[in-house]
Amino acid sequence: MPVTVLLVDDEPLVRAGLRAVLEAQPDIEVVGEAADGAAVIPLVRQLRPDVVAMDVRMPLLDGIEATRALLRTVEEPPRILVVTTFENDEYVYEALRAGADGFLLKRARPAEIVHAVRLIAEGESLLFPASVRQLAAEYGESGGNRAARAAMDRARLTEREAEVLRLMARGLSNAEIAARLVVGTETVKSHVSAVLAKLGARDRTQAVIAAYESGFVAPG
Amino acid sequence: MPVTVLLVDDEPLVRAGLRAVLEAQPDIEVVGEAADGAAVIPLVRQLRPDVVAMDVRMPLLDGIEATRALLRTVEEPPRILVVTTFENDEYVYEALRAGADGFLLKRARPAEIVHAVRLIAEGESLLFPASVRQLAAEYGESGGNRAARAAMDRARLTEREAEVLRLMARGLSNAEIAARLVVGTETVKSHVSAVLAKLGARDRTQAVIAAYESGFVAPG
DNA sequence: ACGGGCCTCCCCCGCACGGGGGAAGGGACC
DNA sequence: GGTCCCTTCCCCCGTGCGGGGGAGGCCCGT
């Protein structure tokens, strides 16, 4: 069964673009569109999409409020992918704190957009998608990692992966982790890769940051 | 002028070993020895060593209490290098929290010992010396990073280095940091290396861990 | 009995990382 | 004027890391 997506954006152009990109995939189906946040809830109830691709800045009801409303009022709410034009957007962090599952820049390449939708649909999170990493790099500083807790909660690490992440967060190398767990380094690499993928982290450093930001490991 | 060292250990054999290793260096001078913590304070007042190499487990007054006493009562106290037999030693962490500047395993290679003394004397800290990393790897878990705050406080990062560390702790790569600071990647590598050296970290991940553990960056 | 998730290990590969040097300019302090 | 530190950039070099695949054994649920 395909992944069903609801597009929510005030600009028709953007909706059309997203639709074109996503419908090109055999396993993704755009089931509906909305031009503002207020129209989202009834549409979700009616269409029950797997994923809502939601703009943050919209008239009437913005993406943040719409996200909150969705999670508050709808049973088994869809997964929410925040789509942002780019820039500084503190709104993005607000939205993630409100319960969104990931974020994506509109200027991302089609393959990235598709990938993001699939990942979100699979129940994983996008904390550091390539595009947003850039945003963080460019406009960082502003306490950007509100996303982390939500991301970590939703990351669904296996026991082994969690164990590996804890050891990463203690500064151990792959070889050291392997020795500790009495397995091969290749095995550790597998787990590390899985952790990075699930957290949307690019490297172990970002994974450790996510671990701290989310409270998965605590200082002191 | 040479680095002056006071050895404090209840085992004569260990003192002799340390003396042999350290005296082999032209720039290091062992100016005295003590067999227990109680003898340390008067000796420090008298000899005013740059560094005190202190065992943790000792009769009468252990290394932790001796460290506290030194820092509390002596003006311009020496730098304190905690020397531990090995193992689990929670005492080590206590000692570091009490104000010690680094720790070292007795089974470390001579070159490591010498290096540790020089580093400590220079006002830097040893948060993750190779030997202790191993300890942490082997016996970890037990909330090992009490050292971090003290280490960070004493690390004396330059402004630029601190800036680089903050960016590292946001998950940025060297190239991204370079772009952010509008300098070359080689420059960033220099700063990163300096940060790693000053924190006693092996790689950027450990540096970021130290940053979190010390409160240099805060989650949330 | 079959599928699915998890853990384990394997291959190849490119690159960023970090260690080892060094060197130049500028500002501060003596 | 000289010295020290900070900042900037350069070289070479090894390797740990992470991406891309795949594959077999195990247990569990149905």
Image (cartoon, coloured by chain):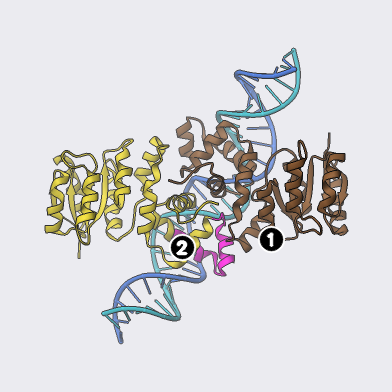
Chain colours: A brown, B yellow, C cyan, D blue
| Circle number at residue B162 | 2
Q: Is B189 inside the magenta-drawn segment? A: yes
Residue B122 placement (x, y as % from top left): 29, 61
Residue B198 occupies which quadrant of the picture? Answer: bottom left
Left or right of residue B206: residue A91: right
Query: Taking the image as drawn, is residue B117 in sight?
Result: yes
Local secondary structure at mark 2: helix
Give the Cα distance between marks 2 and 1. 26 Å
| Circle number at residue B16 | none
> Mark 2, residues whose alpha carbon is within 10 Å: few (<14), some, or many (≥20)?
some
Q: Is A199 inside the magenta-drawn segment? A: no
Q: Main secondary structure of the magenta part?
A: helix
The residue sitting at 53% across, 39% down in the picture is A165
Residue A50 placement (x, y as % from top left): 79, 39
Left or right of residue B68: residue A173: right
Left or right of residue B85: residue B136: right
Residue A114 placement (x, y as % from top left): 78, 47
The residue sitting at 61% across, 36% down in the picture is A157
Judging from the image, mark 1 belongs to the subunit labelled A
| Residue C3 higher or lower than D14, as above or below | above
Residue corresponding to mark 1: A89
Residues at marks 2 and 1 on the same chain = no
Please say if the residues under marks 2 and 1 sit with CB atoms less than 8 Å apart: no
The amino acid sitting under disc 2 is Ala
Residue B150 placement (x, y as % from top left): 35, 53
Left or right of residue B76: residue A2: right
What stretch of residues is rendered in magenta? B170-193
